[in-house]
Amino acid sequence: MTKKSFFTRRLILLFGFGGFAHIVVLIMRRIFIQIENRQLWAKYQTQTFPVQGNSTLRQRAANKGLIYGVAVRKSALSADTHLEEIVTRECGIIVPEWELKWNFLRPTPNTFDFSQADWLANFAGQHQMLFRGHTLVWHEKAALPQWFETTVNHENARQILITHIETVVSHYAGKIHSWDVVNEAIEVADGREDGLRNTPWLEFLGTDYIDIAFRTAAAADPKALLVYNDYGLDYDTDKDRDKRTAVLNLLKRLHSQGTPIHALGIQAHLSGSEPRFNPEKLREFCHQVANLGLKILITEMDVDDQDLPLDISTRDHIIASVYQNYLSVALEEKAVVGILNWGISDKYTWLSASKPRYDHFPVRTLPMDVDMNPKLAWNALAYTFDHASKR
Ligand code: XIL
Protein backbone atom coordinates (compact mmCIF):
# COMPACT_ATOMS: atom_id res chain seq x y z
CA MET A 1 0.00 0.00 0.00
CA THR A 2 1.36 3.46 -0.87
CA LYS A 3 1.72 6.08 1.84
CA LYS A 4 -0.94 8.24 0.14
CA SER A 5 -3.62 5.58 0.02
CA PHE A 6 -2.88 4.67 3.66
CA PHE A 7 -3.65 8.25 4.73
CA THR A 8 -6.68 8.48 2.46
CA ARG A 9 -8.12 5.31 4.03
CA ARG A 10 -7.50 6.62 7.55
CA LEU A 11 -9.19 9.91 6.67
CA ILE A 12 -12.22 8.14 5.18
CA LEU A 13 -12.44 5.96 8.28
CA LEU A 14 -12.17 8.97 10.57
CA PHE A 15 -14.80 10.98 8.74
CA GLY A 16 -17.01 7.93 8.40
CA PHE A 17 -16.84 7.37 12.13
CA GLY A 18 -17.35 11.09 12.87
CA GLY A 19 -20.42 11.20 10.66
CA PHE A 20 -21.80 8.07 12.24
CA ALA A 21 -21.21 9.43 15.77
CA HIS A 22 -22.93 12.66 14.80
CA ILE A 23 -26.01 10.81 13.56
CA VAL A 24 -26.10 8.73 16.77
CA VAL A 25 -25.95 11.92 18.88
CA LEU A 26 -28.79 13.46 16.87
CA ILE A 27 -30.94 10.35 17.23
CA MET A 28 -30.23 10.17 20.97
CA ARG A 29 -31.15 13.83 21.36
CA ARG A 30 -34.42 13.27 19.50
CA ILE A 31 -35.21 10.30 21.74
CA PHE A 32 -34.52 12.31 24.91
CA ILE A 33 -36.72 15.14 23.67
CA GLN A 34 -39.52 12.67 22.91
CA ILE A 35 -39.25 11.22 26.43
CA GLU A 36 -39.26 14.70 27.97
CA ASN A 37 -42.19 15.73 25.80
CA ARG A 38 -44.21 12.70 26.77
CA GLN A 39 -43.71 13.46 30.46
CA LEU A 40 -44.66 17.08 29.96
CA TRP A 41 -47.69 16.25 27.82
CA ALA A 42 -48.89 13.76 30.43
CA LYS A 43 -48.66 16.50 33.05
CA TYR A 44 -50.59 18.87 30.79
CA GLN A 45 -53.47 16.38 30.55
CA THR A 46 -54.20 17.03 34.22
CA GLN A 47 -54.42 20.82 33.85
CA THR A 48 -57.99 22.16 33.98
CA PHE A 49 -59.51 25.45 32.85
CA PRO A 50 -62.82 25.87 34.66
CA VAL A 51 -64.63 28.88 33.28
CA GLN A 52 -67.77 30.43 34.70
CA GLY A 53 -70.47 32.38 32.89
CA ASN A 54 -70.58 33.07 29.20
CA SER A 55 -68.71 36.33 28.85
CA THR A 56 -66.51 36.75 25.82
CA LEU A 57 -62.73 36.99 25.83
CA ARG A 58 -63.12 40.69 25.08
CA GLN A 59 -65.19 41.20 28.25
CA ARG A 60 -63.04 38.99 30.45
CA ALA A 61 -59.91 40.84 29.35
CA ALA A 62 -61.60 44.24 29.74
CA ASN A 63 -62.62 43.32 33.31
CA LYS A 64 -58.91 43.29 34.10
CA GLY A 65 -58.05 46.43 32.16
CA LEU A 66 -56.66 44.34 29.30
CA ILE A 67 -57.34 44.40 25.56
CA TYR A 68 -57.86 41.14 23.69
CA GLY A 69 -57.93 40.71 19.95
CA VAL A 70 -56.68 38.90 16.87
CA ALA A 71 -55.08 39.32 13.45
CA VAL A 72 -57.51 39.16 10.53
CA ARG A 73 -57.38 39.11 6.74
CA LYS A 74 -59.87 41.23 4.83
CA SER A 75 -60.37 38.50 2.23
CA ALA A 76 -61.58 36.06 4.91
CA LEU A 77 -63.46 38.50 7.12
CA SER A 78 -65.46 39.99 4.25
CA ALA A 79 -66.45 36.59 2.88
CA ASP A 80 -67.08 34.44 5.96
CA THR A 81 -70.02 35.46 8.13
CA HIS A 82 -69.12 32.90 10.80
CA LEU A 83 -65.68 34.41 11.09
CA GLU A 84 -67.24 37.87 11.26
CA GLU A 85 -69.52 36.67 14.05
CA ILE A 86 -66.74 35.39 16.30
CA VAL A 87 -64.37 38.27 15.63
CA THR A 88 -67.00 40.86 16.52
CA ARG A 89 -68.05 38.83 19.54
CA GLU A 90 -64.65 38.02 21.03
CA CYS A 91 -62.38 40.90 20.08
CA GLY A 92 -61.73 44.35 21.45
CA ILE A 93 -59.00 44.99 18.89
CA ILE A 94 -58.03 43.74 15.43
CA VAL A 95 -54.83 43.98 13.43
CA PRO A 96 -54.52 43.36 9.69
CA GLU A 97 -52.49 40.20 9.11
CA TRP A 98 -51.43 41.39 5.64
CA GLU A 99 -53.04 44.63 4.54
CA LEU A 100 -50.70 47.16 6.16
CA LYS A 101 -47.52 45.55 4.90
CA TRP A 102 -45.61 47.27 2.12
CA ASN A 103 -46.55 44.76 -0.57
CA PHE A 104 -50.23 45.56 -0.01
CA LEU A 105 -49.90 49.30 0.54
CA ARG A 106 -47.42 50.33 -2.13
CA PRO A 107 -48.10 48.93 -5.60
CA THR A 108 -45.53 51.38 -7.01
CA PRO A 109 -42.88 53.58 -5.38
CA ASN A 110 -45.11 56.64 -5.73
CA THR A 111 -48.59 55.28 -5.07
CA PHE A 112 -50.38 54.04 -1.97
CA ASP A 113 -53.41 51.78 -1.93
CA PHE A 114 -55.25 51.92 1.37
CA SER A 115 -58.43 50.21 0.16
CA GLN A 116 -57.97 46.86 1.91
CA ALA A 117 -56.59 48.24 5.15
CA ASP A 118 -59.27 50.95 5.23
CA TRP A 119 -61.93 48.27 4.93
CA LEU A 120 -60.53 46.65 8.08
CA ALA A 121 -60.17 49.98 9.90
CA ASN A 122 -63.83 50.76 9.12
CA PHE A 123 -64.86 47.29 10.21
CA ALA A 124 -63.14 47.87 13.56
CA GLY A 125 -64.81 51.27 13.94
CA GLN A 126 -68.28 49.90 13.09
CA HIS A 127 -67.93 47.26 15.78
CA GLN A 128 -66.43 49.48 18.47
CA MET A 129 -63.12 47.67 18.28
CA LEU A 130 -59.67 49.20 18.46
CA PHE A 131 -57.46 48.98 15.38
CA ARG A 132 -53.73 48.37 15.40
CA GLY A 133 -51.09 48.67 12.72
CA HIS A 134 -48.57 46.06 11.60
CA THR A 135 -45.97 46.97 10.38
CA LEU A 136 -44.04 50.02 9.14
CA VAL A 137 -40.53 48.56 8.87
CA TRP A 138 -39.94 44.87 8.15
CA HIS A 139 -37.11 43.26 6.21
CA GLU A 140 -39.14 40.21 5.10
CA LYS A 141 -38.91 39.92 1.30
CA ALA A 142 -42.33 38.33 0.94
CA ALA A 143 -43.90 41.41 2.54
CA LEU A 144 -42.09 43.91 0.33
CA PRO A 145 -43.25 44.96 -3.15
CA GLN A 146 -41.23 43.68 -6.10
CA TRP A 147 -39.97 47.16 -6.94
CA PHE A 148 -38.28 47.44 -3.55
CA GLU A 149 -35.14 45.53 -4.44
CA THR A 150 -34.50 47.34 -7.70
CA THR A 151 -35.51 50.80 -6.53
CA VAL A 152 -34.29 51.39 -2.97
CA ASN A 153 -30.62 52.34 -2.60
CA HIS A 154 -28.21 54.31 -0.42
CA GLU A 155 -29.31 57.62 -1.95
CA ASN A 156 -33.08 57.32 -1.67
CA ALA A 157 -33.64 54.91 1.26
CA ARG A 158 -34.09 57.60 3.89
CA GLN A 159 -36.66 59.52 1.87
CA ILE A 160 -38.56 56.38 0.84
CA LEU A 161 -38.78 55.23 4.46
CA ILE A 162 -39.83 58.63 5.80
CA THR A 163 -42.43 59.13 3.07
CA HIS A 164 -43.85 55.70 3.80
CA ILE A 165 -44.17 56.26 7.51
CA GLU A 166 -45.47 59.83 7.21
CA THR A 167 -48.10 58.86 4.64
CA VAL A 168 -49.32 55.69 6.33
CA VAL A 169 -49.24 56.86 9.93
CA SER A 170 -50.96 60.17 9.19
CA HIS A 171 -53.64 58.31 7.16
CA TYR A 172 -54.68 56.49 10.35
CA ALA A 173 -53.76 59.20 12.87
CA GLY A 174 -56.30 59.40 15.66
CA LYS A 175 -57.88 56.10 14.59
CA ILE A 176 -55.16 53.67 15.54
CA HIS A 177 -54.37 52.20 18.94
CA SER A 178 -50.76 51.21 18.26
CA TRP A 179 -48.21 50.71 15.53
CA ASP A 180 -45.57 48.03 15.19
CA VAL A 181 -43.08 50.59 13.98
CA VAL A 182 -40.17 48.19 13.55
CA ASN A 183 -40.60 44.44 13.26
CA GLU A 184 -37.93 41.77 13.85
CA ALA A 185 -34.83 43.97 13.71
CA ILE A 186 -32.76 41.58 15.85
CA GLU A 187 -31.05 38.44 14.53
CA VAL A 188 -28.17 37.43 16.76
CA ALA A 189 -27.05 34.79 14.26
CA ASP A 190 -26.15 37.57 11.81
CA GLY A 191 -23.06 38.05 13.96
CA ARG A 192 -23.09 41.76 14.78
CA GLU A 193 -22.17 42.81 18.28
CA ASP A 194 -25.38 44.81 18.71
CA GLY A 195 -27.43 41.85 17.47
CA LEU A 196 -29.06 43.87 14.69
CA ARG A 197 -30.25 41.91 11.69
CA ASN A 198 -28.58 42.58 8.36
CA THR A 199 -31.39 44.18 6.40
CA PRO A 200 -31.50 46.63 3.50
CA TRP A 201 -32.49 49.38 5.99
CA LEU A 202 -29.41 48.70 8.12
CA GLU A 203 -27.21 48.56 5.05
CA PHE A 204 -28.54 51.83 3.60
CA LEU A 205 -29.16 53.89 6.74
CA GLY A 206 -27.03 52.34 9.48
CA THR A 207 -28.31 51.66 12.99
CA ASP A 208 -30.18 54.99 12.98
CA TYR A 209 -32.96 53.62 10.81
CA ILE A 210 -34.83 52.45 13.91
CA ASP A 211 -34.68 55.84 15.56
CA ILE A 212 -35.70 57.57 12.30
CA ALA A 213 -38.72 55.25 12.01
CA PHE A 214 -39.95 55.91 15.55
CA ARG A 215 -39.42 59.67 15.35
CA THR A 216 -41.25 59.92 12.04
CA ALA A 217 -44.15 57.86 13.35
CA ALA A 218 -44.41 59.94 16.54
CA ALA A 219 -44.51 63.17 14.55
CA ALA A 220 -47.24 61.82 12.26
CA ASP A 221 -49.43 60.51 15.11
CA PRO A 222 -48.48 61.71 18.59
CA LYS A 223 -51.26 59.61 20.16
CA ALA A 224 -50.51 56.11 18.86
CA LEU A 225 -48.63 53.66 21.07
CA LEU A 226 -45.37 53.00 19.23
CA VAL A 227 -44.11 49.44 19.47
CA TYR A 228 -40.95 47.47 18.72
CA ASN A 229 -42.12 43.93 17.84
CA ASP A 230 -40.11 40.69 17.78
CA TYR A 231 -40.22 36.89 18.15
CA GLY A 232 -38.01 34.23 19.71
CA LEU A 233 -38.07 35.77 23.21
CA ASP A 234 -40.00 33.08 25.01
CA TYR A 235 -37.91 30.09 25.99
CA ASP A 236 -35.07 28.99 28.21
CA THR A 237 -32.68 28.26 25.35
CA ASP A 238 -29.35 29.90 24.55
CA LYS A 239 -30.83 31.29 21.36
CA ASP A 240 -33.81 32.94 23.05
CA ARG A 241 -31.63 34.16 25.93
CA ASP A 242 -29.27 35.91 23.48
CA LYS A 243 -32.21 37.41 21.66
CA ARG A 244 -33.75 38.71 24.88
CA THR A 245 -30.41 40.32 25.74
CA ALA A 246 -30.06 41.92 22.31
CA VAL A 247 -33.64 43.21 22.36
CA LEU A 248 -33.17 44.65 25.84
CA ASN A 249 -29.96 46.35 24.73
CA LEU A 250 -31.76 47.84 21.76
CA LEU A 251 -34.61 49.08 23.97
CA LYS A 252 -32.11 50.58 26.43
CA ARG A 253 -30.26 52.32 23.62
CA LEU A 254 -33.47 53.79 22.19
CA HIS A 255 -34.61 54.79 25.64
CA SER A 256 -31.34 56.54 26.49
CA GLN A 257 -31.31 58.53 23.24
CA GLY A 258 -34.90 59.70 23.76
CA THR A 259 -36.45 57.78 20.87
CA PRO A 260 -40.25 57.90 21.19
CA ILE A 261 -40.87 54.20 21.77
CA HIS A 262 -43.68 53.16 24.11
CA ALA A 263 -43.95 49.39 24.12
CA LEU A 264 -42.40 46.06 23.30
CA GLY A 265 -44.46 43.62 21.25
CA ILE A 266 -43.69 40.02 22.15
CA GLN A 267 -44.95 37.93 19.26
CA ALA A 268 -45.19 34.72 21.33
CA HIS A 269 -45.31 32.16 18.53
CA LEU A 270 -45.21 29.30 20.99
CA SER A 271 -44.38 25.67 20.56
CA GLY A 272 -46.37 22.68 21.72
CA SER A 273 -43.32 20.45 21.82
CA GLU A 274 -39.84 20.84 23.28
CA PRO A 275 -40.88 24.19 24.64
CA ARG A 276 -38.22 24.62 27.36
CA PHE A 277 -40.49 27.12 29.05
CA ASN A 278 -39.06 28.61 32.24
CA PRO A 279 -41.47 31.00 33.99
CA GLU A 280 -38.57 32.68 35.78
CA LYS A 281 -36.92 33.78 32.52
CA LEU A 282 -40.08 35.24 31.03
CA ARG A 283 -40.98 36.94 34.31
CA GLU A 284 -37.53 38.49 34.56
CA PHE A 285 -37.57 39.66 30.95
CA CYS A 286 -41.01 41.29 31.24
CA HIS A 287 -39.86 42.95 34.41
CA GLN A 288 -36.72 44.35 32.78
CA VAL A 289 -38.78 45.76 29.92
CA ALA A 290 -41.29 47.29 32.35
CA ASN A 291 -38.45 48.87 34.30
CA LEU A 292 -37.54 50.86 31.21
CA GLY A 293 -40.97 52.47 31.46
CA LEU A 294 -42.31 50.51 28.49
CA LYS A 295 -45.66 48.76 28.11
CA ILE A 296 -45.81 45.23 26.73
CA LEU A 297 -48.18 43.74 24.19
CA ILE A 298 -48.38 40.04 23.39
CA THR A 299 -48.92 40.55 19.70
CA GLU A 300 -49.09 37.33 17.67
CA MET A 301 -49.75 34.46 20.02
CA ASP A 302 -50.30 30.95 18.67
CA VAL A 303 -49.08 27.44 19.51
CA ASP A 304 -47.69 25.21 16.81
CA ASP A 305 -48.78 21.56 17.02
CA GLN A 306 -46.39 20.21 14.39
CA ASP A 307 -45.46 17.02 16.21
CA LEU A 308 -48.04 16.86 18.96
CA PRO A 309 -50.07 13.66 19.29
CA LEU A 310 -52.82 13.46 16.68
CA ASP A 311 -55.60 12.64 19.14
CA ILE A 312 -57.69 15.80 19.34
CA SER A 313 -58.51 15.78 23.03
CA THR A 314 -54.87 15.13 24.01
CA ARG A 315 -53.62 17.74 21.56
CA ASP A 316 -56.12 20.41 22.61
CA HIS A 317 -55.16 19.85 26.23
CA ILE A 318 -51.48 20.38 25.47
CA ILE A 319 -52.14 23.52 23.43
CA ALA A 320 -54.44 24.98 26.09
CA SER A 321 -51.84 24.30 28.77
CA VAL A 322 -49.10 25.97 26.75
CA TYR A 323 -51.30 29.06 26.38
CA GLN A 324 -52.19 29.17 30.03
CA ASN A 325 -48.70 28.49 31.39
CA TYR A 326 -47.17 31.21 29.26
CA LEU A 327 -49.87 33.82 29.56
CA SER A 328 -50.42 33.52 33.29
CA VAL A 329 -46.74 34.37 33.82
CA ALA A 330 -46.76 37.24 31.31
CA LEU A 331 -49.88 38.72 32.91
CA GLU A 332 -48.21 38.84 36.32
CA GLU A 333 -46.42 41.86 34.87
CA LYS A 334 -48.74 44.85 35.05
CA ALA A 335 -47.00 46.49 32.08
CA VAL A 336 -48.68 43.90 29.83
CA VAL A 337 -51.73 45.71 28.51
CA GLY A 338 -52.89 43.67 25.54
CA ILE A 339 -52.96 40.16 24.12
CA LEU A 340 -53.55 39.25 20.49
CA ASN A 341 -53.70 35.90 18.77
CA TRP A 342 -52.35 35.63 15.23
CA GLY A 343 -55.77 34.62 13.90
CA ILE A 344 -58.83 33.38 15.74
CA SER A 345 -59.87 30.19 13.94
CA ASP A 346 -57.84 27.19 12.76
CA LYS A 347 -59.52 27.75 9.39
CA TYR A 348 -57.31 30.78 8.83
CA THR A 349 -53.87 30.39 10.35
CA TRP A 350 -50.50 31.03 8.76
CA LEU A 351 -49.24 27.90 10.57
CA SER A 352 -51.16 25.64 8.16
CA ALA A 353 -48.58 26.67 5.57
CA SER A 354 -45.55 27.71 7.61
CA LYS A 355 -45.61 24.93 10.22
CA PRO A 356 -47.92 22.18 9.01
CA ARG A 357 -48.17 19.00 11.04
CA TYR A 358 -45.64 16.38 10.00
CA ASP A 359 -48.54 13.94 9.45
CA HIS A 360 -50.36 16.58 7.33
CA PHE A 361 -53.53 16.54 9.44
CA PRO A 362 -55.04 20.01 10.01
CA VAL A 363 -53.45 22.13 12.73
CA ARG A 364 -55.38 23.14 15.89
CA THR A 365 -53.41 26.16 17.01
CA LEU A 366 -55.96 28.92 17.72
CA PRO A 367 -58.84 29.48 20.20
CA MET A 368 -61.59 28.41 17.73
CA ASP A 369 -61.75 25.34 15.51
CA VAL A 370 -62.42 25.40 11.75
CA ASP A 371 -66.16 25.59 12.41
CA MET A 372 -65.65 28.62 14.66
CA ASN A 373 -66.47 26.71 17.83
CA PRO A 374 -64.42 27.46 20.94
CA LYS A 375 -61.81 24.84 21.87
CA LEU A 376 -60.02 24.24 25.14
CA ALA A 377 -57.54 26.94 24.09
CA TRP A 378 -60.43 29.43 24.37
CA ASN A 379 -61.09 28.19 27.93
CA ALA A 380 -57.40 28.54 28.76
CA LEU A 381 -57.44 32.18 27.65
CA ALA A 382 -60.71 32.89 29.47
CA TYR A 383 -59.44 31.19 32.62
CA THR A 384 -56.15 33.09 32.49
CA PHE A 385 -57.87 36.46 31.99
CA ASP A 386 -60.27 35.70 34.87
CA HIS A 387 -57.32 34.98 37.15
CA ALA A 388 -55.15 37.92 36.06
CA SER A 389 -54.74 40.85 38.40
CA LYS A 390 -56.44 44.07 37.45
CA ARG A 391 -54.35 46.85 35.88
C1 XIL B 1 -47.21 36.31 8.32
C2 XIL B 1 -48.61 36.05 7.79
O1 XIL B 1 -49.39 35.45 8.79
C3 XIL B 1 -48.50 35.15 6.60
O2 XIL B 1 -49.77 34.89 6.04
C4 XIL B 1 -47.59 35.83 5.59
O3 XIL B 1 -47.41 35.03 4.52
C5 XIL B 1 -46.23 36.12 6.20
O4 XIL B 1 -46.40 36.89 7.34
N1 XIL B 1 -44.32 37.50 12.27
C6 XIL B 1 -44.93 38.64 11.83
C7 XIL B 1 -46.09 38.55 10.93
O5 XIL B 1 -44.56 39.73 12.27
O6 XIL B 1 -46.18 39.63 10.04
C8 XIL B 1 -46.07 37.27 10.15
O7 XIL B 1 -47.28 37.18 9.42
C9 XIL B 1 -45.91 36.08 11.08
C10 XIL B 1 -44.60 36.18 11.81
Image (spheres, helix red, strand yellow):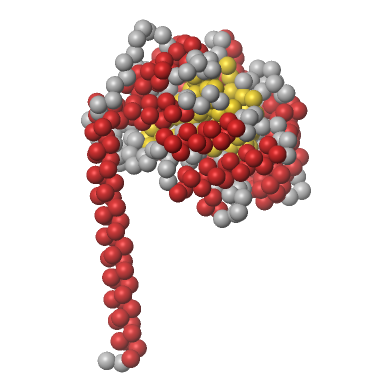
Q: Nearer the viewer, residue 72 or 277?
A: 277
Q: Nearer the viewer, residue 203 or 296?
A: 296
Which residue does the image show at 43% across and 22% down from the upper left?
344
Q: Is residue 71 left or right of residue 208?
A: left
Q: Is residue 303 above or below residue 150?
A: above
Tell me if residue 185 can be seen: no
Tell me if residue 7 can be seen: yes
Which residue does the image show at 70% across and 49% down from the upper left?
206
Q: Is residue 33 left or right of residue 86?
A: left
Q: Is residue 70 above or below residue 160?
A: above
Image quarter where the C terminus lies is: top right
Q: Residue furthest bottom?
A: 2
Give coordinates of residue 277: x percent, y percent. 39, 38
Q: Is residue 40 above or below residue 189?
A: above
Q: Quadrant of residue 185?
A: top right
Q: Quadrant of residue 360?
A: top left
Give coordinates of residue 200: x percent, y percent. 64, 48
Q: Is residue 147 above or below residue 265?
A: below
Image quarter where the N terminus lies is: bottom left
Q: Nearer the viewer, residue 328 or 135?
A: 328
Which residue does the image show at 60% across and 14% down from the upper left?
122
Which residue does the image show at 57% across and 45% down from the upper left?
246
Count of marks placed on residues: 0
Q: Nearer the viewer, residue 293 or 121?
A: 293
Q: Is residue 157 left or right of residue 355?
A: right
Give coordinates of residue 280: x percent, y percent. 44, 36
Give coordinates of residue 245: x percent, y percent. 55, 45
Q: Quadrant of residue 370?
A: top left
